[in-house]
Amino acid sequence: MDRFNRFNSGETTLTRIIVVTSGKGGVGKTTTSAALSMGLARAGHKTVVIDFDIGLRNLDIIMDCERRVVFDFVNVIQGDARLNQALIRDKRCELLSILPASQTRDKEALTREGVQAILEELSQDHEYIICDSPAGIEGGAMMAMYFADEAIVVTNPEVSSVRDSDRIIGLLQSKSRRAENNEPPIREHLLVTRYDPERVGRGDMLSIEDVEEILASPLIGVIPESESVLRASNQGIPVILDEDSRAGQAYVDVVARLTGEERPLRFTELERKGILQRMFGG
Amino acid sequence: MQPDTETPSPITLGLKGSMTAHALLQVPADADEPAATRALATLLAEDGESLRHTPCILAFPERTELPDWLPDWVERLRQEQLVPFAVQCEQAADRARVHALGLADMPVPEPSFRKPRAAPRASAEQPGQAPLVIRQQVRSGQQVYARNQDLVVLASVSAGAEVMADGHIHVYGELRGRALAGVSGNAAARIWCQSLQAELVAVAGLYLLPEQLPEQRQRVEIHLQDDQLQISGQ
């Protein structure tokens, strides 16, 4: 766990600020943010997940709390509400809070000082702060990564997504607070999502090895392509709560690896379905 | 430099080189002794306070030899409480005269209006200049330029990244992005890489695109010959 002097305040903290980022849109950043924050909280870690996608807020829908949003991230930054008024406590897991984005503002509403003040306040009583980055490399995405200690770079096994992730890793290494202060760099973890071993076998998709070789970053997990992801999103249930789904189980593995456990990769090989699996579904 | 104090024997003297401020008193080539003395009076009247007790070097630029009135002139300076300690001269005879006065000889510096330096050349022609060494992967969107030197990349260069050098470029990982050697026009610059999967390679402005690259792509060398990019490998 990181132990260092954050924000030059003289205090050491154990909070890990983790940005979930990708560059490209639609690869599964918000799904991942929701799953990991829920998984960390259920593992007993006090966690908050912040939606940095100001103007296109989604996280609250996936977390099934859109009807409970009264104040948001921008209200807190502008001083219209206190942080505690904007934080939404998850109904399924009391160690998890959500700080929703504003739907009516744009990303220019975020200031670096404001974000820093909120992260400092959250650091006082949370173990994990998950920052759900918007797509792109503009202000909102840069703000989401700026204060991070670690980054989960979400990549689909296809060329354009891998290239965008490569670009984001370059930015993590040069445009973050840690880079600007010459501190140890952001630890990046590669998360490959929507992986389909069958399509990899046919040559339609890049393999895990291809992605790892191009990005040269440590892999923290592989999430298989799964219908349960879309179903879970629409129902407002983080997919990690769907214990029957392979995507959910793969996210459980990622949470375990984030907290220091070693687990082998699952669902990355093409498997022959046994007779029982055929009868009862996979 | 002079010994500070005379000390009893077990003590060793510190001897160090040092750079100290001193005045340079220049006597024009066409001045005889009376003219130089008048000019000295004028100078002391204007700025005597800062000149007195200040170490100074005497210079007689553009003369073939030191004037024969040098000993008198040095004596006059000392009477005026100036502290001459050296004289600029080159000839052996002049140096002997200076030493006889108890002064040091100093070489005449080269004229300050030197020829403008030749434009900086690429390191390919300038052995000894350290290369720019990049240890991390050069990521998509990043640009690295080794100005007036070689570039060594110990990792891969991603697609969408660009590496440039005025000298040679070495890539020890895969070259998937763009590499431009000799960008200031050095036609002798070369590119070496372990694996050539580049989007573009160029030497001195002449470039090749992926479809023009050969099948042989492992451990290649790229250089210019007769205005053509040559790619050779093992």
Image (spheres, helix red, strand yellow):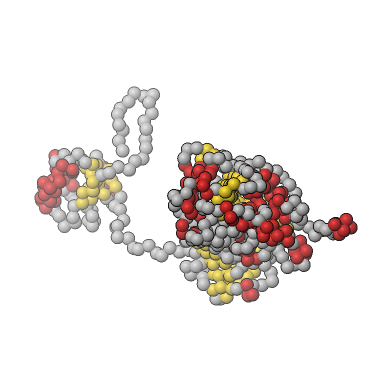
Q: Is residue A245 visible to the viewer in this orientation of the structure?
A: yes
Q: Quadrant of the N terminus of chain A?
A: top right
Residue that appears at 11% across and 49% down = B42
**Residue extending furthest toward the front:** A67
Question: What is the number of callouts on the image?
Answer: 0
User: Of A24 and B50, which appears nearest the observer?
Assistant: A24
**Residue extending furthest toward the right:** A275
Picture quadrant of residue A247? bottom right
Q: Position of residue A119 (x, y in %)?
A: 51, 46
Q: Position of residue A201 (x, y in %)?
A: 77, 64
Q: Position of residue B142 (x, y in %)?
A: 54, 61
Question: A84 above or below B221?
Answer: above
In the image, taking residue A71 as reference, residue B97 lies left or right, namely: left
Q: Quadrant of the C terminus of chain A?
A: bottom right
Question: A102 above or below B72?
Answer: below
Picture quadrant of residue A281? bottom right
Residue that appears at 14% across and 44% down = B48
Residue that appears at 36% across and 30% down = B13
